[in-house]
Image (cartoon, rainbow, N blue to C red):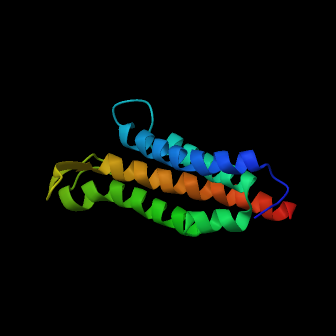
Amino acid sequence: MRTDTSLILQMATRFLVPLLLLFSVFLLLRGHNEPGGGFIAGLVASSAFALHLFAFDAGSTRKLMGVETQLLMGIGLLLALFSGLFGMLVHGQPFLSSQWWSLSLPGIGEVSLSTPLLFDIGVYLVVVGVVTTIVLSLAKAEE
């Protein structure tokens, strides 16, 4: 933990990071019908991690993320690719054709899933991975 940053910034960061991450999930899930989606949600999540980096240090930010940024990018790309190929392989439709299906979860009820949502989640993971890789690399270069 760095000692040259403000105590106020550190305390505010502990409050704001969970709110920013929750807001990014909100933007991700409403992106089909309203403004939002994977890209802007990924930028909001990345800004939460950047704020944490400014308040603390790169090591604690990596620990907060809990996963390597390159892994996020890879999983995101595979998920986006899978969402595009799903309609082709299963139904013989063109690449990136939207597919919808329902899932019944006990205690929750009927949940609607779609390939556009999977694509948005893939974009979200790629954006978070790329932006945090850049920010963490700049922090490492500064050290």
Pick whichever, 22 or 36, lies toward us. Answer: 22
Q: Is residue 66 above or below residue 6?
A: below
Q: Is residue 96 visible?
A: no
Where residue 104 appears, as percent x and y from the top left, is 13, 55
Q: Position of residue 58 (x, y in %)?
A: 72, 64
> Image point 18% across, 52% down: which residue?
108
State the image quarter where residue 88 is shown: bottom left
Q: Residue at x 85, y 55 (%)?
A: 4
Which residue sits at x=13%, y=59%? 106
Residue positioned 44% across, 55% down in the render: 122
Q: Quadrant of the C terminus?
A: bottom right
Compared with residue 72, is residue 87 higher up or lower down, i.e. above or below? Answer: above
Quick check: 109 left or right of 115? Answer: left
Left or right, 127 with reference to 134? left
Tell me which corner region of the image, top left, top right, bottom left or bottom right, holds residue 66: bottom right
The picture places residue 112, in percent across and down from the top left corner, at 21, 47
Task: Please indicate, yes or no, whether residue 121 appears anywhere in the rendered image.
Answer: yes
Labels in figure, total: 0
